[in-house]
Structures are given as structure tokens and as C-alpha cells.
Image: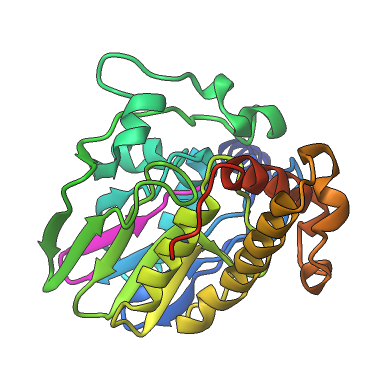
């Protein structure tokens, strides 16, 4: 009995936060762990993001490693039950930390880490790096949940030039669509064989997007390019819709916001009063509308104040 008790205590120490993760099959050889449409909290352990595995005969490719070392470890253990394969590559879609703080786990498994130039510039390089305690996750999660989480540099940096690699009969192409959408370094990942595109936080569904580091014009331009893609699956950074309809609600939200903000600017409305006019009631019941919409409107106003519509 004593040995059983010690084993239980050891297990609890190793897995201080149980994410209760279950992969969902999206398409042939594509599995995703879908995050909750919530704000980051100690209660959810930062599990607000989508982390996806593409399975090939030669190993897994992970798109966005998630919010902590423990999270990444638990996704890996869950995937081992489907197929006992190594993770060969981990791709970071952009610099927000809910998407990449699991990188250190996959680096411990000798995976190649690929990500945007902005990650190297703002987060980590081989000569300097941010500390885990400086991240947004560290402000909300317990030390136990963040246990073993560290920040690692990229092995391959993608900026203006697309990067492709092949693994197990599948070709992965990583590229930027526009100069600024959700952030200034958003990457998408195209799969040739599976006819899928992973778009990171260029698109949210099941909840309102956050525009704090983005461009409303660039985001709409990027969505137009995604809509033109010849794919069967559009897999977003947040949300469970994975069909080509995944972009529709955010496109409608941003389009309405753009039109109303531009109209207000034309009528001389000052930024202090913009949120009294741009409420977008059609989206008022969407998850995180109350938390994010007013901030999105302010960001849109700041950008659109100098915007000239193309003829």
C-alpha cells in the first residue's frame, strides 16, 4: 500500500495539472486538441488554443505546441495511443505564447522547431531570450502548471520566403500571406496531400478575435486569400469549425466593424466616443465579446483613421 501511495504522489507531482485532453480527428491523418473559448485562467491551465498533429509514416508534425510543457507532454502521450511515432517538426504560427510555450517539451524530444521571424526578434534567438516568468501565461497560471516550461529558440526561421519540407509522403509549405494580420509575423501551413491549411490566429471561430497586435485591413486581406485556397479543411488557432466556413463569421465581424468605424470617422466621431456607436449587436452573444470587442474597435479606429479606401 505504501508503494502505491508513493506512486500516486509521484504521478500527481509529475502531472500537476491534468488537461484531460482528447484528440479529435479532423481529416485523414490530422488530429487536433481544441482549446476552450475562454480567457486564460488557472482553472483552464491556458487550454484556450488549438494544437494539431499531422501523422505521417515517418513521424508527427505539430502545428502550435500549446501553453505549457505539461500540455505538450499530455498531447504527445495521447497521440502515442493512436500511433507510437516521434514528433519530427513543431511549427509556430505566430508569437503569442499560448501557441508555443510547449516547444520546450518537443525540443527535449529532438524535434525541429520552425517559426516566424517575429518570434526570433521578440521572443528568443540563439543569443538572447525572454524568460518564462516574463510571458503572459506566467501572469495567470500557477508555478506547478508551468513546471518545466522554458523558452527555446527556433531552428528554422520563416519570413518573406516560404519554406517547404517533405515527410512521409506529405509536403508542408509554411508562408506568410500578408505583412500584418493578427500579428506582424503570422504563418500559415499548407498540406498538399491532405488539402488542408492551418491558419493560426488569422481566424478565430467559436469566439471573438483579438486585434491588439493586428491589422483589420490585413486580417481581411488574409481571409480573402484563405478563402481562395483550394483546400477541404481550414484549421484555425481557436475554435472547432474546420471547414471552409471557418472564416465566415470573423470576416462578417471585421467587415461590419470596418464599415461602421470608417463611417464614424467620416462623421467626425472622436476615438473617445467610438465605442458608443460601434456595438455590433449581431455578435454580442459570441464568446469573449464583452472582454475584447471594445478593444478591437479602438484598434480599428487607430488604424482606419489614416486609411484611404481604394477606388
State the residue lying farthest toward the top. 127
Residue at 61% over, 63% down: 254
Image check: 4 left or right of 122? right
In the rendered image, which quarter contains the C terminus? bottom left
The x, y position of residue 266, in whole percent, is 70, 53
Q: Residue at x 66, y 45 (%)?
A: 301
Residue at the right extreme of this rendering: 276
Q: Which colouring convention does the figure follow? A: rainbow
Q: Quadrant of residue 258?
A: bottom right
Magenta highlight range: 56-66
Q: Is residue 201 visible?
A: no
Q: Nearer the viewer, residue 221 or 133?
A: 221
The front one of 97 and 301 is 301
Residue name at image x 12 percent, y 58 percent: 165
Queried whether the magenta region covers residue 64, the answer comes back as: yes
- The image quadrant that residue 298 belongs to is top right
235 w.r.t. 310: above or below: below
Percent of width and height locating residue 25: 45, 79
In-front residue for pair 261/195: 261
Q: Residue at x 36, y 64 (%)?
A: 53
Compared across the picture, whether 214 is left or right of 85 comes to right
Amino acid at each position: 500500500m505504501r508503494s502505491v501511495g508513493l506512486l500516486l504522489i509521484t504521478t500527481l507531482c509529475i502531472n500537476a495539472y491534468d488537461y484531460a485532453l482528447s484528440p479529435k480527428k479532423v481529416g485523414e491523418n490530422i488530429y487536433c486538441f481544441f482549446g476552450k473559448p475562454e480567457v486564460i485562467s488557472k482553472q483552464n491551465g491556458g487550454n484556450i488554443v488549438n494544437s494539431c498533429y499531422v501523422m505521417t509514416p515517418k513521424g508527427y508534425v505539430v502545428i502550435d505546441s500549446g501553453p505549457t510543457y505539461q500540455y505538450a507532454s499530455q498531447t504527445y502521450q495521447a497521440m502515442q495511443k493512436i500511433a507510437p511515432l516521434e514528433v519530427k517538426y513543431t511549427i509556430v504560427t505566430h508569437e503569442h505564447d499560448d501557441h508555443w510555450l510547449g516547444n520546450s517539451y518537443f525540443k527535449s524530444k529532438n524535434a525541429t522547431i520552425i517559426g516566424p521571424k517575429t518570434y526570433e526578434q521578440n521572443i528568443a534567438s540563439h543569443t538572447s531570450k525572454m524568460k518564462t516568468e516574463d510571458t503572459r501565461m506566467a501572469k495567470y497560471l500557477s508555478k506547478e502548471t508551468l513546471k518545466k516550461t522554458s523558452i527555446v529558440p527556433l531552428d528554422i526561421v520563416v519570413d518573406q520566403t516560404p519554406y517547404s519540407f517533405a515527410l512521409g509522403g506529405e509536403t508542408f509549405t509554411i508562408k506568410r500571406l500578408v505583412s500584418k494580420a493578427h500579428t506582424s509575423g503570422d504563418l500559415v501551413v499548407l498540406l498538399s496531400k491532405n488539402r488542408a491549411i492551418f491558419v493560426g490566429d488569422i481566424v478565430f471561430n467559436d469566439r471573438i478575435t483579438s486585434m491588439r497586435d493586428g491589422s483589420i485591413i490585413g486580417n481581411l486581406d488574409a481571409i480573402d486569400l484563405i478563402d481562395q485556397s483550394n483546400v477541404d479543411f481550414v484549421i484555425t488557432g481557436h475554435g472547432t469549425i474546420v471547414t471552409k466556413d471557418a472564416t465566415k463569421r470573423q470576416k462578417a465581424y471585421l467587415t461590419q466593424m470596418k464599415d461602421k468605424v470608417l463611417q464614424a470617422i467620416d462623421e467626425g466621431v472622436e476615438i473617445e466616443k467610438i465605442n458608443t456607436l460601434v456595438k455590433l449587436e449581431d455578435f454580442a452573444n459570441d464568446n469573449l465579446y464583452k472582454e475584447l470587442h471594445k478593444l478591437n474597435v479602438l484598434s480599428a479606429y487607430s488604424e482606419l483613421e489614416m486609411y484611404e479606401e481604394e477606388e
